[in-house]
Amino acid sequence: MLAAIATLRIRCQQALVAAFGPELADADPVLVPASNPKFGDFQANGAMGLAKRLKNKPRAIAEQIVAHLQVDDLCEPPEIAGPGFINLRLKADYIQQQLQGIHGSDRLGVEMAKQPQQVIVDFSSPNIAKEMHVGHLRSTIIGDSIARVLEFMGHDVLRLNHVGDWGTQFGMLITHLQTVCPEALADAEAVDIGDLVTFYKQAKQRFDEDEDFKGRSRDAVVALQSGDETARKAWQILCEQSRRAFQAIYDRLDIDLQERGESFYNPLLADVAQDLKDQGLLVEDQGAQCVFLDGFTNKDGDPQPLIIQKSNGGFNYATTDLAAIRYRTQQDGAERVLYVVDAGQANHFAQVFQVAAKAGWIPDQSEFTHVPFGVVQGEDGKKFKTRSGETVRLKDLLDEAVKRSRADLEARIAAEDRQETEDFIQQVAETVGIGSVKYADLSQNRTSNYIFSYDKMLALQGNTAPYLLYAYVRVQGISRKGGIDFTALGKNAAIHLADESEFTLAKHLLQLDEVLAEVAKDLYPNRLCQYLFELSQVFNQFYDRCSVLQAAEPERTSRLMLCDLTARTLKLGLSLLGIRVLERL
Ligand code: ARG
């Protein structure tokens, strides 16, 4: 529909100029989607705002515009309503012809971005030696979907996993393991990630309680950071362990991601500090090297510093992010960098972006954006935890979703007295289970917190993955039942719309380009979810009202084309959310 909107906007502008002279070339016709389908498809509300300037009544202005408006190739004769709204209704011919166009297009009529950009999406980014938790799940799912949409629009996307692989946790962990499990530091096979997490917790406890341990841990960090052979070897083994566990999750979630963790920037940190110093931005404050921030104050109202280098010489999380910004613009040539990280880090990003801008590391034409998201909550409204109060392990969460989706499926198979192979059951359970977890997350406005509920996400009704997957399966069923090969519908097949539900479905199908353009710009995948949910609804309404296989020609072919377009749109849309479709459920 983007093409229609653009054309109508130009025509309205031309009508304004034709009616009132070239001075009106700058006037906005205020073309918007109609508030109610009763009024048509679009309305031009510009007349109201021009009354003063043209010293005339809005309604009279609207009449003048309409008298000069040439849209008969696209629309029915425009109507004026209320004080001066101009209502526009697309012609059936125009809709049919547009739909015919997208039917013949692999991209379903979605144009590539006119100016492809070099984009980095920084997402997932768990911490080594700690287990990946639900917060990282949100980042992984949302980040992947944003990357998929941008890639589809033709941008060059670098998907970066900024793993926390360089923190003080290694000092504690190495020191602890030296006494309790030295083999873990010599052999990547000796322990698994579960053990590692337990060791980490023990180490943390010793660190907090035991001064001597604390000191030795700090020395171990220094040893590691200064390149000590043994410490480095141990660090590598620990990273390798975690990496394998993370990869198992990424494989299961079908996530493509390039690791470039904090350690990658370690050799660049001193230079970042030096660069800030040379620019006169670095100030010494209680032994630490800092940059003072605008707009951030502490409790006493004093300006707050961002610490670049601690008094002991160590660098911070923020310093690493500064190095990453500089590297991403200067080496990667990034024009747009998106950080899909929980909303709790909003200040961190505002601060590093400010310092990077001051240092001249963010070129004017480039955009650095924190893409925040809320917390996952349990059904009690508190932070999502296991019964015993532990953080939920991602693997357990996915297993549970698949287990439940399998139970639902088995019950259905039994009720319908079907025979299915273990392979089929396994594959459907996994696809629906994982798809439901992803969809439940993506369908929420990402900035809000959301309540995690297996029952809701797996429900067959409502805005859920199973509901959408069913709409897709319905079309596959039509094709199986009628022996229809959708790809063979051919170029001569034509679309004829008659029933109201066909028009509603057709117009919805034409909106994909608009929705994707919006997601690519504003980065809210729930907009795409809402679109696909509504598409499934209008498709089901159409299918309940109009017979397809039983219909006479030319309706039959036309309706098959509507079915095919619906299935292709669902498949494409879901793939951009990282969700796979199934032929049968
Ligand atoms: N590892 C961090 C965490 O778990 C997230 C890193 C996000 N990316 C970044 N460039 N700071 O909170």
Image (cartoon, rainbow, N blue to C red):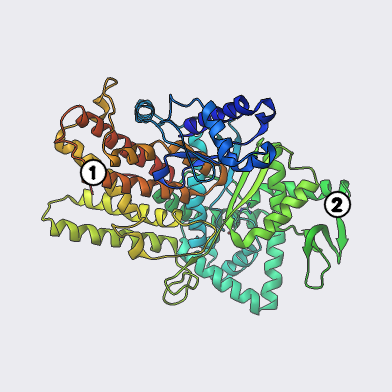
At horizontal 51% and vertical 66% (from top left) the residue drawn is 197
- Residue 24, percent across and down? 66, 30
- Residue 258, percent across and down? 54, 43
Q: Residue furthest bottom?
A: 209
Q: How busy is the neighbourhood of tag 1: few (under 14 within 10 Å), some, or many (20 plus)?
A: some
- Residue 31, percent across and down? 54, 38
Residue beneath disc 1: 543
- Number of the label disc, if any, that sits on residue 281: 2
Element type at marker 2? loop
Q: Earlier in the sequence, mark 1 or mark 2?
A: 2
Element type at marker 1? helix
Residue 394 vs residue 106, the one in the foreground? 106
- Residue 339, percent across and down? 60, 50
Q: Residue furthest top?
A: 492
Distance CA(mark 1)–CA(mark 2): 65 Å
Is 484 rendered above or below residue 419?
above
- Number of the label disc, if any, that sits on residue 307: none
Is 95 rendered above or below residue 59?
above
Residue type at mark 1: give it.
Tyr
Residue type at mark 2: give it.
Leu
Which image quarter: residue 460?
bottom left
Residue 71 vs residue 401, the one in the foreground? 71
Q: Is residue 200 visible?
A: yes
Q: Are marks 1 and 2 in contact (CB under 8 Å)?
A: no
Q: Is residue 310 visible?
A: no
At horizontal 59% and vertical 76% (from top left) the residue drawn is 205
Which image quarter: residue 545?
top left
Quadrant where the N terminus sits is top left
Is 538 rendered above or below residue 485?
below
At horizontal 29% and vertical 40% (from top left) the residue drawn is 500
